[in-house]
Image: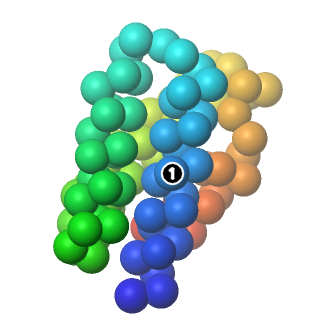
Amino acid sequence: MKNNEKVRSACVAAIQVFDKLDKTEYADLKSKLEYCVGSYDYDKNPSGLIEYGFMALETLKNFKAQNPRKINKKIIENLEKSLS
């Protein structure tokens, strides 16, 4: 259960990053993550958080590869750690 909270926290941090990036191509993923966080808060089932957490992780890694200074690597590390 404690690890699920870490996944939730990492996903919330990813949502904040997508907010700051403010790019329309990430809007869908961001809204799905927000939905999954709300859903998890309601029923404590982490499956959606984990699924979209992995998508967010890949998206953030790809973005960071092209824009190394725009994303704090701690955000990516936290997502990786919580999802492992």
Q: Nearer the viewer, residue 54 or 15?
A: 15
Q: Residue furthest front?
A: 42
Q: List x then y, in percent, for residue 67.
A: 68, 20
Q: List x then y, in percent, for residue 26.
A: 40, 23
Q: Nearer the viewer, residue 16 or 56?
A: 16
The quarter of the image holding the C terminus is: bottom left
Sort mark 1 into few (<14), some (14-19) or many (20+) by Cα contacts within 10 Å.
some
The quarter of the image holding the N terminus is: bottom left
Position of 3 with respect to 49 (left or right) is right
Q: Which residue is mark 1?
A: 12
Work out whether 37 lies above or below 19: below
Q: Residue at x 48, y 13 (%)?
A: 23
Q: Residue at x 27, y 39 (%)?
A: 32
Q: List x then y, in percent, for residue 45.
A: 22, 73
> In the image, what residue type sits under mark 1?
Val
Q: Secondary structure at mark 1?
A: helix
Q: List x then y, in percent, for residue 10.
A: 54, 58
Q: Residue at x 53, y 36 (%)?
A: 60
Q: Residue furthest right?
A: 69
Q: Residue at x 37, y 15 (%)?
A: 25
- The answer, for residue 60, to whether it is visible in the render is yes
Position of 27 with respect to 39 (left or right) is right
- The answer, for residue 61, to whether it is visible in the render is no
